[in-house]
Amino acid sequence: MHNLTRFLFFAFTFFAVTDSYAEKEGFPGRSLEKYSMVSVIELQDLHRRRDEFTVVDVRSSFEFDTLRITGAVNIPVTAKNFDSAVRDLREQTGKPIAFYCNGHTCMKSYKATKQAMATGLDKVYAYDAGIFDWARGYPDEAELLGKSPVDSARLISKKVFKAHLLDPDTFSDKATAIASKSRLIIDIRDHFQRAGIGFFPAIERWASLQDMDKLRKYLKKAKAQNRTLFIYDNVGKQVRWLQYELEARGMKNYWFMERGAKGYYDVLSTDEGLR
């Protein structure tokens, strides 16, 4: 583990990540008590009744811009104006609303539906099969990097994604062993997730997905100078979307940190004997 970060460890004890990064089969959200009141709409049913619904993508704008259902509206569930934006949308369309996020294990569609219900809206549903099932099932009604139909061959598989993953220790060792002019370490967490502190002080750059202009400058620089990229996020999920940008740019020399900052934090905790 990178020695420069050891002294920062106890500053991270307040930092908690609640997102689950475990891969599970099926639809785990359907069995959670806190979402028992949420109504679910299945893939085929939503497609058959597509014109009857307003479809809302509750992921980040970056994820939405990368891959989305054609005609969907982007209202991130984390947005401060989520409640008012959803109410305004209902007033404009008068239609039932189907919320979606990434897939079976993503809880944002449930959270958005529950939150909309709490504001007094009815006829709101979680489409919990997510964007990937839709893109594979109905490529003519999905967009990848602004283009439709979606070529399923361009959907990055888990195998290809995992080929660019390094466990936190290996990521740290490899990133700090390479000469500074030959590598670029980037923290893409947002301001809240980062909490003002990176894991590689003085040698990393910070460019969140909310500031794509800045991030793209770093990517352009890395490619022009043939640098190896070392990129980490919060829990290892956002980098999957950034990979589309990297591949579209023809970049091959890049690595992601497995489980992101959460994984790094877990390793620090274990090394310090707190687990």
Image (cartoon, helix red, strand yellow):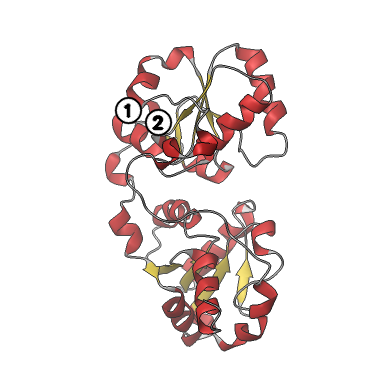
State how far apart marks 2 and 1 are (Cα).
7 Å
Q: In this view, does 115 lie above or below 175?
A: above
Front in this rendered view, residue 269 or 96: 269
| Image location (x, y in percent) of residue 103 | 41, 40
Q: Can residue 74 be seen in this view?
A: no
Q: In which quarter of the image is residue 141?
A: top left
- Picture residue at 30% right of the left edge, 51% below the top: 157
**Dot 1 lies on which element?**
loop
Of all residues, the one furthest to the front in this rendering is: 33
Which class describes the residues within 10 Å of circle 1: few (<14), some (14-19), or many (20+)?
some
Q: Residue at x 40, y 21 (%)?
A: 46
Check whether the beta carbons of the residues at disc 2 and disc 1 lie within 8 A of each other.
yes
**Residue labelled with disc 1:** 138
**Is residue 156 left or right of 108 when viewed as pictured?**
left
Amino acid residing under circle 1: Tyr
The relative height of residue 20 versus residue 39 in the rendered view (above or below) is: below
Tell me the crowding category of disc 2: few under 14, some 14 to 19, or many 20 or more residues within 10 angstroms, Cα based: many
The residue pinned by badge 2 equals: 142
Name the one closer to the observer, 264 or 74: 264
Residue 70, image x, y percentages: 45, 27
| Residue that appears at 51% across and 60% down | 235
- Residue 44: numbered disc: none
SS label for mark 2? strand
Q: In this view, does 15 lie above or below 103?
A: below
Q: Residue 56 at what x, y percent from top left?
A: 54, 28
- Residue 208 visible? The answer is yes
Is residue 197 found left or right of 64 in the rendered image? Answer: right
> Which residue is nearer to you in this view: 113 or 60?
113
Please tell me in which quadrant of the rendered image residue 255 appears.
bottom left
Which one is nearer the viewer's eye here, 20 or 206? 20
Please determine whether, in this image, residue 240 is positioned above or below residue 148: below
Name the residue type under label 2. Answer: Ala
